[in-house]
Image (tube, grey):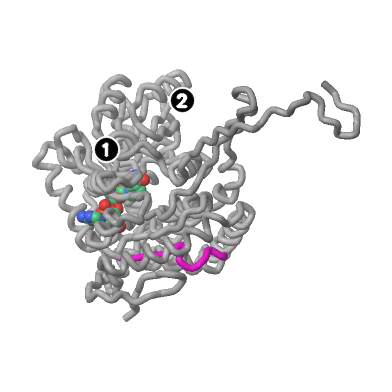
Amino acid sequence: MKRISHWIGGKSVCGESDRQAPVFDPACGIQTAVVDLADPVEVDAAVAAAVAASYEWRWSSLSTRTAVMFRFHQLLDGHRRELAAAVTAEHGKVLSDASGEVARGIENVEFSCGVAHHLKGGYSQRVSTGVDVHTVLEPLGVVAGITPFNFPVMVPLWMIANAIACGNTFVLKPSEKDPSASMLIADLLHEAGVPEGGFNVVHGDKITVDRLLSHPDVDAVSFVGSTPIARYVYETGVGHGKRVQALGGAKNHMVVLPDADLDAAADCAVSGGFGSAGERCMAVSVLVAVGEIADPLIEAIVARIPGIVIGPGHDPASEMGPLVTAEHQKRVAGYLDRAGPEGAHVVVDGRQKSFDSEGYFLGCSLIDHVRPGMAVYDEEIFGPVLAVVRVRTYDEAVALVNGNPYGNGVALFTGDGGAAHRFESDVQVGMVGINVPLPVPVGSYSFGGWKDSLFGDSAIYGPDGVRFYTRPKVVTARWPVPATSVVDLGFPQTR
Ligand code: NAD
């Protein structure tokens, strides 16, 4: 059985604790590996390696770090297929989707290649007689990243690229459900020239995370995962004096106005709701149908569902893969049991689709007449289940979106520029799409939800990532004013 160990000080290190977790291929339900789970002693070893590498790395020149990030970018580019295959094998998403994830992750490395520009400070000459002021952005030291199962390449790269380019060293605690991709990333960073200890991976669970949150040498923590754990990580990390950004779960609404292009809206509801089996933090999970568009929109989506090819992620014909674990599959299916008794109408029940496999497959579901107060509306399902809420007006739609405790992503479908412009200001959500179902910002912007979707005041990657992984310093300097006002430089001076 394959064993996935930690990466500490530039090499693979077997765990010393006797704690391990199984890793499965979700497409067939077979265990393919075991992953070591780190105890505090292994976390301490990883943090010590990061501390030891910190001095050399923070003093390295910007051109050295830029060159390393360019090499890392090239290596990622050359290993796209291998990375995508590792994602598919343990997460289950289809290869085209996994390749898309790798591409979006590489965007973050591309951004970090501009670190010399991103770290430019300000300079004011003669703020007072003989006094100049300038700012510098310094690295924090050792930073930790704790990542979810659903993007095992992209989300670590959201953090690693800027953190390392800015001169920090890093300890990653990836999801124990699909840990292999992080080991490939470690290999590539090593090959790119990040010094030993500059990047470390400890696999693990709550015990591992708790040690990272309390370790005195960890200066900052980036977390991406579900809202209850995000809240816990934020409160615990801040309680230990750390800088923390913790991105949580979501319940993303897609509002469709009566004037929207029906086919485009139906296509986007299907891809946004069922793509990656709904296991995306930006997935469309609530379709808000405004007025008379509800019936034709539902009809168009229902007509599309049988055409979605569900199968193993490595099969190029598959458009949707299995869910990540048997437990998660059961949990998602459980929402379909509850919807009817709560008063909703299950129009398409994904449980009725049969699969010739022991994998964790579940068909796509559509539930109509959903309202707040029902579990399918109130809770993050994180599966291929689309809930439809019917409202009469634009104002009702906005009130619904703003009344939800999450505020990650939202989309509006309309042909009316005025309505779109107004919506942009009316909604209390961090990322807004206009005729775009999953408005994930490109790498030169930053990603972050509002309300229960983000704890802390910093979004992730892009410019906010640079700010999060650096500390500004303001230097005020006085130098003697020259005694004469003209310096003889040996050639004519202009005034
Ligand atoms: P999760 O919260 O269960 O796990 C995230 C990380 O926290 C993992 O590394 C896990 O090992 C660790 N963890 C789990 N339980 C813990 C505990 N009790 N104490 C300390 N650490 C713990 O999330 P998941 O199931 O891996 O991922 C899916 C969730 O992530 C969804 O809620 C999704 O919306 C969210 N997500 C959010 C974003 C975003 O950008 N906002 C992006 C991707 C995923």
Quadrant in which residue 340 is drawn: top left
- Which residue is denoted by mark 1 in the rendering? 452
Q: Is residue 84 visible?
A: no
- Mark 1 or mark 2, which is nearer the start of the sequence? 2
Q: Residues within 10 Å of mark 1 (few under 14, many from 20)?
A: many
How dense is the environment of label 2, judged by Cα within 10 Å: few (below 14), some, or many (20 and up)?
some
Horizontal placement of 98 versus 233: left or right? right
**How far is disc 2 from disc 1 in space, using C-alphas?**
31 Å
Q: Amino acid at mark 1?
A: Asp
Image point 36% across, 34% down: which residue?
410
- Disc 1, SS: loop
Marks 2 and 1 in Cβ contact (< 8 Å): no
* Residue at the right extreme, as displayed: 491
The residue under the point 29% across, 72% down is 36
- Side (left or right) of 373 relative to 318: left
- Residue stretch in magenta: 193-203
Please state the horizontal and vertical placement of residue 115, each as a whole percent of the image.
Answer: 57, 47
- From the image, which quarter does the C terminus lie in? top right
- Quadrant of image for the N terminus: bottom left
Residue 387 vs 38, above or below: the answer is above
Q: Give percent across and percent down for residue 163.
A: 47, 51
- Amino acid type of the residue that numbered disc 2 sits on in the rendered structure: Gly
Q: Nearer the viewer, mark 2 or mark 1?
A: 1
Q: Residue at x 24, y 28 (%)?
A: 403
User: The residue tagged with tag 2: helix, strand or loop?
Assistant: loop
